[in-house]
Amino acid sequence: MKLHQLVRPEKYKGGKRPSFAAAYARAARRYGFETGRNAGFAKRNNIVVKVKGKHDKDTEHEVPAESIQNGSLEYVVPVKIGTPGVTLNLDFDTGSSDLWVWSSELARSSAQKGHTIYNPSKSSTAKKASGTWNISYGDGSSASGNVYTDNVTVADIVIKGQAVELAEKLSASFLQDNGNDGLLGLAWPQINTVQPEPVATPVENMMKQNLINPPVFTVKLGRGDEAGFYSFGFIDTSVTPNPITYTPVDNSQGFWQVQSTSWMLNGETKERSGNTTILDTGTTLCLVADDVVDAIYGAIPGAVFDDQQGGYKFPSNATIPEISFAVGDTLYKLNPKDFAFGDAGDGFTFGGVQSRGDLDFDIFGDVFLKSVYVVFNQGEKTVGLAQRND
């Protein structure tokens, strides 16, 4: 059984979450959307900005890089790299394809408090590889460095010769983020950033080295301090009694993108012809089209758009409607516990479902994914979802 338990960084213990603005701005940075009717954040001229309000889309200000980095993922996973090996806490992210880590090549790396550092000189299996990597984000932050290969242990699976991207330079916003020691991407290999040639991702290498059968990884995200897990090569049928239903994936853009052509509000099914969504554990919110956002908050008495904070909020004592979104031909109910994202002040709560701006596809982040158990089948290019009852 290849289960890999999730843990929450210290800053998110006790059920704390990223700030609403940081979570929303992080999504705008990743997907580069312009605001529609309802999105309070947008990416303009390669910078993430907060717009003035629902009816005024002029720029209010640039979102500080630190704020966006502090919207980092709510979960980390311990991963051992090297021989004898050091254990780093990494973000697992189905929306990116790089495995990069805090390393001894960082200036004053030994003085970086709150982080575990990978030092290839201390690993007997580390080898310098060709290539460099550079990730630049819309908030002005960046990470870059060179590449080694080494043994990487995920759960009880040892991946030999896995490319590990060593951070040589990190912008200030990364240096201020104590939530993780790097990131492990679980999207498709073509969006890996190593130049001149992309490198194989951990899951791709698990498949090439015949380390997992079936060729899948799965995720159950927990709530608060509840334990969740990833698994590799193993489907845990004890998570839910409900069936796992599979649907084809379009990986042409490197993401786990699937059809989502209907949704349900208080028992009424609404069609969304041709609509698709990306399943992304690296995004916190659930981002959908403006007409869907309007219908949802129109069904909550007292819900309003908050111009100052950039999204919809609702009275904390309001009854949340029944909301379901389709993946393939199956509707999955969003747990009301996850719809209520966080305190908006003055007796209001931010909604976890917000606008996708001008994107022509949805983003189903953690707010949706906590309601389901997901099987990502990279071998067959499908995803399977089962409704959770917890």
Image: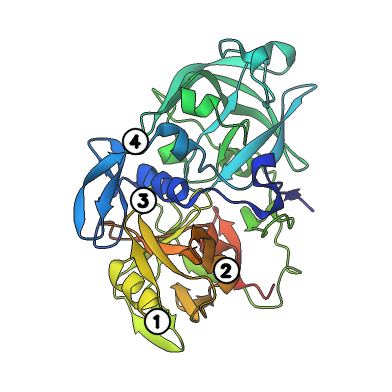
Q: Along the horizontal axis of the image, is 306 left or right of 321?
A: left
Label 2: how many residues lie within 10 Å, few (<14), some (14-19) or many (20+)? Answer: many
Q: Nearer the viewer, mark 4 or mark 2?
A: 4
Residue hosting label 1: 299
Disc 3 secondary structure class = loop
Alpha-carbon distance for marks 3 and 2?
21 Å
Q: Of callouts 4 and 2, which one flags the residue occurring earlier in the amino acid sequence?
A: 4
Residue hosting label 4: 138
Q: What is the three-letter code of the residue carrying label 3?
A: Ser
Q: Along the horizontal axis of the image, is 238 left or right of 197?
A: right
Q: Of callouts 1 and 3, which one flags the residue occurring earlier in the amino acid sequence?
A: 3
Which x, y percent locates residue 86? Answer: 75, 25
Alpha-carbon distance for marks 3 and 4?
23 Å
Work out whether residue 138 or residue 206 is closer to the camera in this orientation and state it: 138
Q: Which mark is residue 385?
A: 2
Q: Nearer the viewer, mark 1 or mark 3?
A: 1
Q: Nearer the viewer, mark 3 or mark 4?
A: 4
Q: Residue at x 40, y 73 (%)?
A: 303
Q: What is the three-letter code of the residue carrying label 2?
A: Leu
Work out whether residue 38 or residue 45 is closer to the camera in this orientation and state it: 38
Q: Nearer the viewer, mark 2 or mark 1?
A: 1
